[in-house]
Image (tube, grey):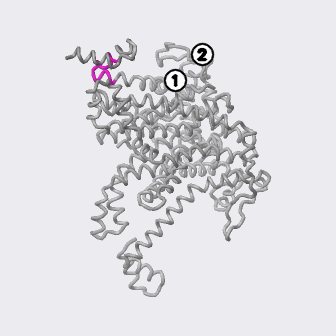
Amino acid sequence: MSTEAESVGREHESKWPGPVVSLSRWLENLGETAFAYLLLTPVFVLLGAIAFYPLLRTLELSLFTGVLGSGEPTFVGLQNYVDLFTGAANPSLPGSVTFLPDVTTSGGFPFVHLEGWVRSTLIVTLLFTLVSVSFETIIGFGQALILDKDFRGRRWVRAAIIIPWAIPLVIQGMIFYLMFHPSTGFLTSYLAPLGLVAETNTLNDPASTFLIITVADIWKTSAFMALLILAGLQSIDRNLYDVAKVAGASPWQQFKLITFPLVLPTLIIAVLFRTINAMRIYGLIDTVSSCTTVPSLSCMVVETFYSSRGLSSAIAFVTAGIVGMIASVVIYQRYKEGF
Amino acid sequence: MATIDGSNDSTESEGGPLARWTKSVIEDQEKRDRLYRALFIVAAGFFLVTTLFPFYWLLVLALTPTSQILTGDWSLPIIGVEFPHPQGFNVYAFVEMFEQVPFHLFMFNSFVLAISTTVIVLAVATLAGYVFGRLEFPGRGVLMLVVLMISYFPPAAFLVPLFDAFLGNAVVIPFLGIELFESPRLVNTPASMVLPFSALFLPLAIFILTTFYAQIPDGLEDAARVEGTTRLGALVRVIMPLSAPGLATAAVLTFITVYNEYFFSSIMALENSPENWSPLLGGILSYQTQYTTEFNLMAAASIVGVLPIVIIVIVAQERIVSGLTAGGLKE
């Protein structure tokens, strides 16, 4: 029986050269576990080289001094981290501490006393994340509620809402750069009297630029939230609404008692996911203004990786650590739901 | 909308038109439906205007000649409302932008990078999606978590060692100090961008394909196996064709993400020139740095750069929606 099957197999594959046939036979005889791990090799080779190796190496480099690619690095232990958090590293970082200068200077942070650049980059990154994700959630929810309805032209409305999400970061940045540039921006003349942005030199003013970047991000990414929330909305059993209507519930009550609670799990995952992504903010800042005006964590890595590699690695690892903490919440959430 | 409060109010103050209207809305089902409908249209219109207005603004800028832009009075009243609109009709900007900067070469680079990344990602993610979606083996959950974790880290966390290696320096095992090999000098080549893109955008494609492959009934694969097809043969001839929508979804999303990528695109090409494989981003930024007052060209270039994406979104929006929900939520 087995020899017959083998000969049939050989006949079937005879157009292939010998080594291929024996290779495919060897593959077929592998157990399921070995086969699975074999097929996963390319993934983990790629991830190993481009993700795991750099991550570990970043941690190692952050313990040394040194300029990129040259010079003999010396081991300094955690000195780079200490310098970052005490403000001793400020001279190596570009620009000056301009953002929200005196709000929390004297206030002791629960564990470390934050000084200078890291304080302002942390505040910038976290504040940006908080504000943009909150607004994106609210606006995304609104958009999702609209896309959930059936109406003529729904396809086109949906396309219009998705397009900002899909456009390149650099073009998004360019749009908002042009909107607020002193020579072209018409918006400055409307918003400056309201005190929202600085009247002159708008794109070099930290607070104005921060606002512009946050609005730009909300404009682009609300659609992403909308699509995730929409998926949650559409998984709700429509019969529930029929029952509610018969029972005389108003649309607001239907929203409060059916839609919102049922979409909440999806909403939480979407918010965490967006939070992780918002912490990466770099490209938008780089296009609209500059990293010295609105310093984010990723910005600082890019600004320093040529001149002081150890410091840059330390900032990168701090960034990774913060993201890692939020990510572990997400992963725990998924683990609980039976991953 | 507190119904009880509203009706009490309206019985007490019969006179006011607002109260009368409120009362009628509360009592009259048809009127209430009309109100919700109106609110719906207003909200939909608001979202349409806010998402599309910036593109309109690009068009306004592109069509207005530079001299007009610099004297800049945008607020010309239309129907009593101040609203920016093109002052002039200078289509020539779309020709001039190609004369000033070889924008087509930057676009070409973007397409080469996006397509090659998409091919690599699809090939690798198909194998992984098959394994995660259809095989049971010890360590499956842990490995999926590891892949998921990677997709969460910001690109900045990988930058320093990658840039170091791509400059042609030795790759060293972390903490052991053993030099493995000297990497070839990859900066200014497509590889320096395609490699990081492939690794970092791989997880999303893996999760999309895992979801789609897992939905193919076992019976179909078994039937192919009985016919004498190998496991990989069944993957290529049965599972992949049946999951064509999934493959298209992964491809579209990978393409869009690479085309839009900023971080590595701006760093791995050392200068913004097409010879250095600088993609679209380099082209757009060239206008910003070299032709600082040619705002109409910046706008025109942005419009040209956005066109491929607009076409993809209009053609493939079903795929984008299903991909984001499958990959983002992993339900």
Q: Position of residue A209 (x, y in %)?
A: 63, 49
Q: How many marks?
A: 2
Q: Which amino acid, by three-letter code, is at mark 1? A: Leu
Please give the residue where the numbered disc 1 appears in the rendered image. A63
Q: Position of residue B150 (x, y in %)?
A: 44, 32
Q: What chain is tagged by disc 2? A: A
Same chain for labels 1 and 2? Say yes or no: yes
Judge the density around disc 2: few (<14), some (14-19), many (≥20) Cα neighbours within 10 Å: few
**Majority secondary structure of the magenta segment?**
helix
Outermost residue to the left: A1
Does the image show residue A130? yes
Does the image show residue A105? no
Above-or-below relation of B261 to B93: above
Q: Is residue B154 magenta?
A: no
Q: Position of residue A188 (x, y in %)?
A: 68, 56
Above-or-below relation of A329 to A3: below
* Residue depicted at 70% across the width and 42% down the height: B288
SS at badge 2: loop
Magenta highlight range: A24-36
C-alpha separation, residue under disc 1 versus residue under disc 2:
13 Å
Q: Assess whether mark 2 and mark 1 are in contact (beta carbons under 8 angstroms).
A: no
Please give the residue where the numbered disc 2 appears in the rendered image. A72
Quadrant position of residue A119: top right
Q: Quadrant of the C terminus of chain B?
A: top left
